[in-house]
Amino acid sequence: MLTQRAAGAVRSPFDRALRADLVTEHCVLELAGGERITLAVARWHAAADAADELLVGRCTGPTLDIGCGPGRLTVALGARGIPALGVDVSPVAVRLTRRRGGAALRRDVFDRIPAAGRWQHVLLADGNIGIGGDPLALLHRVGQLLAAEGTALVEVAAPGTGLLRAPARFAGPERDASWFPWAMLDAEAIAAPAAEAGLSVVWHEARSGRWFVELAR
């Protein structure tokens, strides 16, 4: 689930989408240019699926799930005996993850994170590469969190998207007029900011209409 930094505070514009009574509603991310992207809210609340296996199955050691949302990946890792911690600025997300049996902290990824520099894997699923609207800054931060031999597993946009940065807002059943910085990029567009952050693409693959890459030093 996407999260954001705001001046002087952190908050999540997606708290509404995490409410159980809105799971079946049509929740949309609206971009300043007029584009509307339907959010996969039901998937966030469900158990990890076959596409998620491309992320979960690559994790062999302690894993940090950035923007964990309701915690499906954090919980799936824990069920396999992989130490996992979810972090999210949303108190709703943290509460839901803990309720499902996962470990989670309410924390901005750019603030102090436990075991920084020692995580074997970092997950950025469900569009979380867009956190803060600056993929380069986020990938730099990911590099700081990873162990020397660690990898980042990132869900990216469909081919042809390139790099898109734009203000966005949640346009769900209860519209939130607050705009926040947001970004998306595809498997090719991630290569340049990853390289600048000291990372390179190890592989990229599509499954069930979703696209993923793994980054390593």
Image (spheres, rainbow, N blue to C red):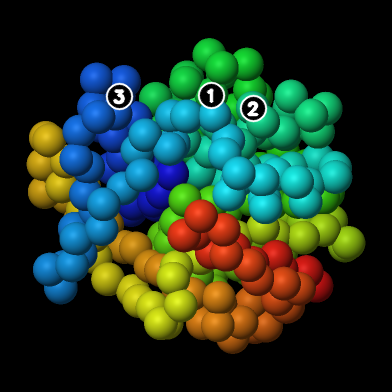
Mark nearer the N terminus (3 vs 2): 3
Contact (Cβ within 8 Å) of mark 3 with mark 2? no
Instruction: Reply above or below: 211 against 186.
Output: above
State the image quarter where residue 98 is shown: top right
Mark nearer the N terminus (1 vs 3): 3
Looking at the figure, which quarter contains the C terminus?
Answer: bottom right
Return the x and y of residue 47 as percentages of the image width and height.
54, 29
Instruction: Reply above or below: 99 against 56.
Output: above
Given residues 185 and 203, the one toward you in this image is 203
Image disc number at residue 75: 2
For mark 1, does the 10 Å Cα neighbourhood hold few (<14), some (14 to 19), or many (20 or more) residues?
Answer: many
The residue at which mark 1 appears reads as: 97
Given residues 94 and 204, the one toward you in this image is 204
What kind of element bears circle 2? Answer: helix
Return the x and y of residue 10 as percentages of the image width and height.
38, 43
Return the x and y of residue 176 as percentages of the image width and height.
14, 43
Residue lying furthest right: 149
Label 2 or label 1, whichever lies nearer to me, is 2
The residue at which mark 3 appears reads as: 19
Residue sitting at x 47%, y 21% = 96
For mark 3, does the 10 Å Cα neighbourhood hold few (<14), some (14 to 19), or many (20 or more) residues?
Answer: some
Residue sitting at x 31%, y 20% = 20
Tag 2: residue type?
Val
Contact (Cβ within 8 Å) of mark 2 with mark 1? yes
State the image quarter where residue 102 is shown: top right
Residue sitting at x 39%, y 25% = 92
For the residues marked 1 and 3, what is the alpha-carbon distance in whole angstroms? Answer: 13 Å
For the residues marked 2 and 1, what is the alpha-carbon distance in whole angstroms? Answer: 7 Å
